[in-house]
Image (cartoon, rainbow, N blue to C red):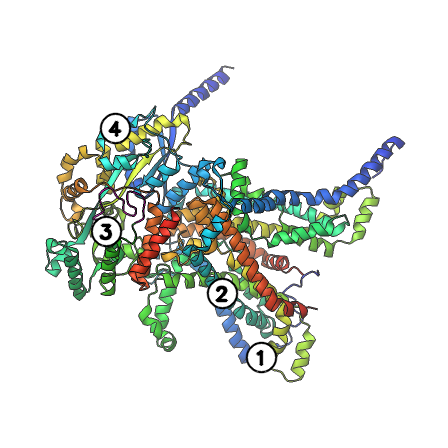
Amino acid sequence: MARTQTSESLGWRTRFDKFQRRAAPYVFVSPFFILFAIFGLFPIVFSMYLSLQAWNPIQGLGTMRYVGLENYIWLMEDPWFWRSITNTLWIAFASGIPQHVIAIPLAFALARGISGFRHPLTAAYFLPYITSAVAISLVFQTIFGTQFGALNQALIYLANAPWSAWLFGGLAENLPVNWLGRAPYIKPAIAILVWWQFFGFNVVLYAAGLATIPKDYYEAAEIDGASARQSFFHITLPLLRPMIFFAVTLTIIGNLQLFDQPFILTGGTGGTSQAGMTVAMYLYRTGFEWLEMGTAAAISWLLFLLIGTLTVIHFYFFGRSGLESRD
Amino acid sequence: MTKFLRIALAALLIGGVASAQTTLTVGVFEPHQDNLERVLDEFYAAHPDIMLEIRTLGFGDHHDLLVTNLATGSGAADVVVIEIGYIARFIAEGGLRDLSVEPFNADQYEDLFVDYAWAQGRSEDGRQVAMPTDIAPGTMFYRRDVLEASGWTIDQVNASMESYIEYGRHLQEMGVFLIANAAQVADGMIRSDIPAGDGIYFAADGTPQLNSERFLQAARVAKTIRDEGLDAQIGAWSSEWFEGFRQGTNATELSGAWLAGHLANWMAPDTAGLWGASVVPGDTMVSWGGSFWAIPTQTPAAKIDAAWELILFLTTNPEIQLAAFRNIDAFPAMPATYDDPMFSEEMAFLGGQPARELWATVAERIPGVLTHQGDIIAEEIWSSALGEILNEGRDIQAALDEAQMLVTRRIR
Amino acid sequence: MRPPATPFKSPAADTRTGRNPVAQFVLYVVLIALALLTLFPFYWMFVLATHTQSSIFSAPPPMWFGEFLDRNYQTLIGRLPFLRNIWNSFYIALMATVTTMFFASLAGFAFAMYEFRFKRALFGLLITSLLIPPLLGIIPYYLIIQYLGWLNTPRALWVPAMASAFGIFLMRQYIASSMPRELLDAGRIDGASEFRIYWSIALPIIRPGLATLGMLTFIGQWNNFLGPLVVLNQRESYTIPVALRTLQGQIQTDWGAILTGTALAVLPLLIIFVFASKQVIEGLVAGSVKG
């Protein structure tokens, strides 16, 4: 860029240039922080304030009434709140643990057991993760149908077919299962869906973790005559620990906030006897169906506390070893 | 230039016509849509300047959405229908126009309606917030073919709750279920013998009644039916439930008269002629549903005249009240219609029975039931407690005591 | 923090090939069976989208395509302003994607290329913000949107999503590993302004990373449910997931129409995934594995 400049304008330019150079990084990062202040930070502070109020939005902002810790105390004594907590934990564990138990060997098998089709298989497992939870839940609602659902049809077939009856025959008298209508089956149904939607994501995470393990380890083990099983338990698992720790953390945080899947599968109600009502759903219903905004805000803080506590426990028991073995 | 003028004139004219036309959005839950669509022509003939746009949602979604729309002051339809379970709550929370004042002056129509329906649409401070459109006498539908095969008569079946259950035991031997779900029997029983002045779930003074003898007894009877295997254990409004009606696997169903409309219109039209209607066992007169029309405060002032025209058309026009009765079995909230010849007409779907006469008798004898703003949540808590009693074998007293406590907490 | 490894170039791979063909065959059968099981609901969704309500609810249920797709689609647009709903979803996702690509790369550029006061603190704050559960602010978010008068408008959803912390983090990592500092200095010597350097030098280099971020943002917004559920309560303003939800609640539910709707909701993502599955997977993993 060739420019002809008078000395006067040069001074102005230099000063501007210096200024824009110094200001640039701040200007560049500012959009995020402005938006974060409005839509991230302020809501948190405000929700804390709101959780100490009794308020129904129909009557306008002026009707807010300070009630201290009443919302929290009320929730602590609320059977539905506790039910939603146990539901959430139940679903979180029942869908979460199998996710990892299956994803780790699966990632190992993909990385070391086979020689081709690695990507198409991974992509197939991963696909549910990127699809709309609402769309998927609607499809699963038909899969879980009592009389005509694919799952019951398959189970009935397996229970009666000669080759599989030895394994599934015991189910026969309980079939067909009313997955979404009967309280004891709602949580398993939700857990199956959540498991299905997220195990592939963990497979990919563990594949990334496996990629960081130097192949010499395996070669050395092979020379020593170790079997695939032995290298899995003595090399892969220990070295994968940081990734396991990380992936489990993500599962905890995600599963405790479960909303879309139970909301759709139970038609927004939580199902028979609220057996499928998660904390997130209870929060939604309290705020937007019963219009108790203060109580709803208190639920969000208690949920935050629950997530925090479980994460800290997880860090305490698994975090140190997980982080130590990290290079 | 002349061309331009002509175009401008045309545009003006079109604009003028368009502005004279008011488009009203009407928010309903099923099956009100079925009825509205069939009376549309008549409405348009009387009001060529009003266009209707019907927005249908499921029962729960319709009301939940209305809650948020009224809370935010935007998004609600111009005219909305409200079911009886929600009416007290909407009246208490506000967001609906007072129809007693100008330009509506609804109070002049008070005498047209069943007393308690009118009262249910009115706030404590005397504002008429909603216009009653239908009430719902409770009834028992039964399969005539099954009854005949059993050798029983309907009078034997519905003589008492005990004889009803006895009929179920008899059906069991024939391989037919008495009812889709025992909970329906309990739901019928909590609606009967309500002390004068009380509501289904709340006494006149607002105390919840969920562990009162009425509820305990209802739960006990339902549990007997369940424990003896007399019900099909199918949840209402599930696809299995619909299928049960089509296949005739369930011999009876307890409900509001409006269920006949669902059955005939879409649930099981092929079973026409196979059904009959009687009073609920024990000769009990119960009210089971009902709905109201209202105008949200947020409906623009320019539209409220049209909105009111629509409501008057639907609620005060005897022809239309009767049309709704014919179309979806929504029982008129307007007693003046009860001597219409239509009431003695034979209903093909119910095997030629003039069932409307029966429902009218029930309707006239139903005591006014008080509504409470906690009705809908109490209903959810009750049905979840009942579910635990029936499915999970929970102790009746314990379950209902907890339900009582939950409702008390909810209405704090 | 180090850039995350990609899952597909495992140094440990390929060493065991050729050993025990029977075991490998069995493994393939298991892995493929699991993949088919995973894909089955998608297949079934497309199959059911072409059937009537009554054949969906029949035993055995249909397993091959029928001929009622058009009828189902007509039912769908008869019950909902569905084209409008698709447009809303698309518009919101697109606006969020374009703005996020711009603001996130801009901020990522600043965090990767500059040394400035409070940089560490600001970056720390950014990372911390990722840990806040979105549910914590959902009630106030609704109140803010109401206060701004943005209820039932697309901007209620895309404006708050304009600059995601996740996106900035992803961009910072990408720029730090792919753009040499010297280019910054070279640009300055040429007299370019800082923004010019970002626009003319950095952007072309990070194009692949930017594309990944764009796809991830689009997918996330397209699938978003709770946000629209809370701030959109008028059917003309619904996005696809919320619109489908309203059909589900009706007792005369037409499942053929619903599944046609879900198929339409899933289709765009399937197309993206078919063409760019590696990029999407790697981007999502890179974003979660924070080094």
SS of the residue under disc 2: helix
| Proximity of marks 4 and 2: CB atoms separated by less than 8 Å | no
Q: Is residue A110 magenta?
A: no
Q: Quadrant of residue B15?
A: top left
Q: How many neighbours does mark 1 have within 10 angstroms: few (below 14), some (14-19), or many (20 or more)?
A: few
What is the spatial separation of the Cα atoms under label 3 and label 2, in whole angstroms?
Answer: 40 Å
Q: Which label sits on residue A229?
A: 1
| Proximity of marks 3 and 2: CB atoms separated by less than 8 Å | no
What is the x, y in percent for residue A269?
39, 52
Q: Earlier in the sequence, mark 1 or mark 2?
A: 2
SS of the residue under disc 3: helix
Determine which residue is flagged by label 2.
A93
Q: Quadrant of residue C141?
A: top right
Marks 3 and 1 belong to one chain: no
SS of the residue under disc 1: helix
Chain letter of disc 2 in the image: A
Q: Amino acid at mark 3?
A: Gly
SS of the residue under disc 4: helix
Q: How many neighbours does mark 2 have within 10 angstroms: few (below 14), some (14-19), or many (20 or more)?
A: some
Q: Amino acid at mark 1?
A: Arg
Of tags 4 and 1, the one toward the viewer is 4
- In the image, the segment drawn in magenta is B190-208
Q: Which label sits on residue B109?
A: 4
> For the stretch drawn in magenta, what is the main secondary structure?
loop
